[in-house]
Image (cartoon, helix red, strand yellow):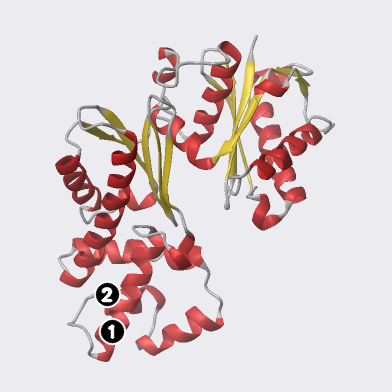
Amino acid sequence: MIHVLGIDGGGSKTVCVLMSADGKILGHGQAGPSNYQTIGIEAAKNAIISAIQQAVEHSFLALEKFVPIQGISLGLAGVGRAEDIAVIRTLVQEIQTDSKLPIDWKLTPETIIINSDSVIALVGGLGHSVGIVVIAGTGSHIFGKNHQGITKRVGGWGYLLGDEGSGYDIAIQGLKAALRSYDGRLDSTQLIPAFQEAFKLHSMEELIPLVYRHGWGVKDIASLAPIVDQVAASGDSIAQIIIKNAANELALATEVAINHLFEPTESFEIVVMGGVWKGLANFRHQFETEINAIAPLANIISPRHEPAYGAGLLALVQINNPKPPVETLPATFLQETDM
């Protein structure tokens, strides 16, 4: 039996799926972050080992003494250069010597696959490797690939230099609008009472110690995006403008990817991922309206599978066909949705 591991390693968590040759998930594991650029290589290795161990132990294969693994595919945040891939290849070699893992490693250099998290998000979300993924969570970026194997990444410059259309972007614009309104520099908005109620503030001045002295980070601020979304959904015009501008920014970035990768006569899929898409204030509808106007043959979908599943698919394709057509994956892989 052929078994592979698909790993999605990000800045907040690491997910591993154990998959069979027909694309079925046999085990699922989750551990802490594994972006080695931010937490260090040893901590990243330990998180990946923990996620693998859970995936194997949670499967029926745990009854066996050792589970044969013929392929491993990793999609990791912070991996974008040749030197990063070399670091992760060394990490995978070290993982294979860990005695805690009940695995019979049968890997070859060709069946150790390392990509950025964008690649596995695309493949997992679509179930195949041609199209575009638009990620709008804490941060934001767009990644796409066409039938010729050409790729394009747009955005992803981080919260200081970019991340337009992200949860952080929406939240920080909401906070700024509330403070401008509080000063009298902007019309009245329900963002003020919404933020005050959320944090039990008597006045907006009390935001200062919360944000600056308590050291709010990117994720803390991004977590406020649903407040802006709810106020926009209730009809507040200022909050609605923030949501509209965020959707516009993502549509603009997606248009750049579309123009780079696809001809006007081509049909293709765009998968949207991240918490921002779950908002109540027509964020997705506004995005879709703009994309449909510039690319009427584009089909915008929700994810078919999680990114870790996309990593596993890449491992299976490599085992089954070392040089597969980029536009196809086995049809059985599209039959289960693991979101």
Comparing 176 with 198, the one in front is 176
Q: Position of residue 293 (x, y in %)?
A: 14, 43
**Residue 191: assigned label:** 2
Relative side of 76 to 68, left or right: left
Name the residue rendered at 66%, 38% in the picture. 51
Q: Look at the numbered disc 2 and give the secondary structure of its residue.
A: helix
**Residue 127 in which image quadrant:** top left
Which label sits in the foreground, 1 or 2?
1
Q: How crowded is mark 1: few (under 14 residues within 10 Å), some or many (20 or more)?
A: some
Name the residue rendered at 64%, 12% in the picture. 2
Comparing 38 with 29, the one in front is 38
**Residue 302 in which image quadrant:** top left
CB atoms at circles 1 and 2 under 8 Å apart? no
Q: Name the residue under label 1.
A: 180
Q: Position of residue 4 (x, y in %)?
A: 63, 21
Relative side of 95 to 318, left or right: right
**46 versus 139 height, above or below:** above
Among numbered discs 1 and 2, the one appearing first in the sequence: 1
**230 versus 263 height, above or below:** below
Indicate the quadrant containing the N terminus: top left, top right, bottom left or bottom right: top right
Name the residue rendered at 47%, 58% in the picture. 157
